[in-house]
Image: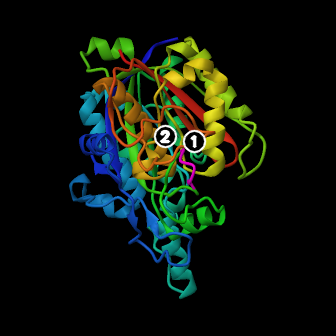
Amino acid sequence: MRNVVVTGLGAVSPIGIGVGAFWESLCAGRSGIAPITRFDASPFRNNLAGEVTDFDASGLGTDLDDISRCHQYAFASLLEAISDAGLPDAGLRAAGICAGTNFGSLEWGQQHLAQLFIDEPVAPRCWEQLRLGSGIEFFAGRLGLGGPRTLVSLSCASGVAAIGHAADAIRWGRADAMLAVGHDELSIFCYSGLSALRAITPDIIRPFDINRRGTLFAEGAGALVLESEAGARARGADIYARVRGHAMNNDAFHMTAPDKTGKGIVAVMRAALDDAQINPEQIEHINAHGTGTQFNDKIETASIKAVFGEHAARMPVVSMKSMMGHTMGASGTLESIGAILTMRNGTIPPTINLEEPDPECDLDYVPAQARQQQVKTGLCNSYGCGGTNAAIVFERP
């Protein structure tokens, strides 16, 4: 089984376009939450979300008008990650891709329905882009990827699951390099569905705070280039991190409600540690799912304690959703990028809006301000509706 490393990163987020701007905002504790401009959110519980602003697709190619906004975000993040990795053309032609998304191009689904209601012909691109797999076909064709291609849609665990699936393709010799990308866009379709789950806060997102009342959703994309460690070192690539191990499972409990025992979350973290072949005490930082909902934050905290015991109190545990919102299918990839840069730069971004700690959420959440601290090994958690859980372990090389 081969070692897998990360050699390239790309990000399009509500707190910055490009990895540099994204990381700067995280370390500054800068919020990307603002009133929604893409649709009328007045019927819903809150009109706030994390929209991507100042995104310019004009430099991505002339045919970008034929793909949806979320696929534009994903393609931009992929181009940045490939450039960052310095992956040669031959390596790109042999590379594969795994993409993760919750909803895909539902904004174009709205256009499709609107045209049907007024009895107008539906544009062929709307039909095409509604397929969840349409984006990955575009990416592979445009980039000339000849390796395996897979799409996963596992609710909010999709991003971490995509990285894990891509890593496995390398570990087991099916590819020498893989691209992993998570992406989603805000639309009234997805927002109304998420609102129906009653998970949206009426005010602001405040993970682990006693006054937390729910999450806020967002959009964006994150991409990583993964390679075999031997191949990356042979070509002199700059290595960000090793993918030590990962795991996925399902609570098999309820379609939307979380299992309050946390059994699935505990099991997935333990399985990721087993896959990484490291002890719990070797993890020095956790990038939490941290949605700001009443049950998630309490269950995740208790699950971390169950897995790590007394060591849990010594680990910084942060929620990047406090700044960028819940970017759905992109959350696991963007948060993994944040975890990798935490190890790379020796800076732990803060959990903002944490003003009054919940007695049941009593770990070190790095409130308010970033912290300078060297971190060698980190774990990233992602959980989704339907009970899907995913966890991944990264190590500084």
Q: Nearer the viewer, residue 13 or 361?
A: 361
Question: Which residue is at the far left?
Answer: 59
| Residue depicted at 27% across the width and 58% down the height | 55
Question: Which residue is at the far bottom?
Answer: 118
The residue wearing badge 1 is 157
Within-10-Å neighbours for mark 2: few <14, some 14–19, many 20+: many
| Residue depicted at 57% across the width and 61% down the height | 200
Q: Residue 332: give its label.
A: 2
Marks 1/2 in contact by CB < 8 Å: the verdict is yes
Q: Is residue 248 visible?
A: no
In the rendering, at what x and y percent does residue 268 appear? 65, 28
In the rendering, at what x and y percent does residue 327 appear? 47, 51
Q: Nearer the viewer, residue 136 or 385?
A: 385
Q: How far apart are the alpha carbons under marks 1 and 2?
A: 7 Å
Q: Residue 338: give its label.
A: none
Q: Which residues are magenta?
A: 208-212
For residue 157, side relative to residue 286 (left or right): right
For residue 2, side relative to residue 196 (left or right): left
Q: Earlier in the sequence, mark 1 or mark 2?
A: 1
Tell me which corner region of the image, top left, top right, bottom left or bottom right, holds residue 242. top left
Prevailing SS of the magenta stretch:
loop
| Residue depicted at 38% across the width and 64% down the height | 34
In the rendering, at what x and y percent does residue 326 appear? 49, 51
Q: Is residue 216 visible?
A: yes
In what element is the residue under mark 2?
Answer: helix
Q: Quadrant of the C terminus?
A: top left
Question: Which residue is at the far right?
Answer: 253
Check the image and report above or below for 101 versus 350.
Answer: below
In the rendering, at what x and y percent does residue 312 appear? 56, 24
Q: Amino acid at mark 2?
A: Gly
| Residue depicted at 39% across the width and 17% down the height | 376
Q: Nearer the viewer, residue 293 or 21?
A: 293
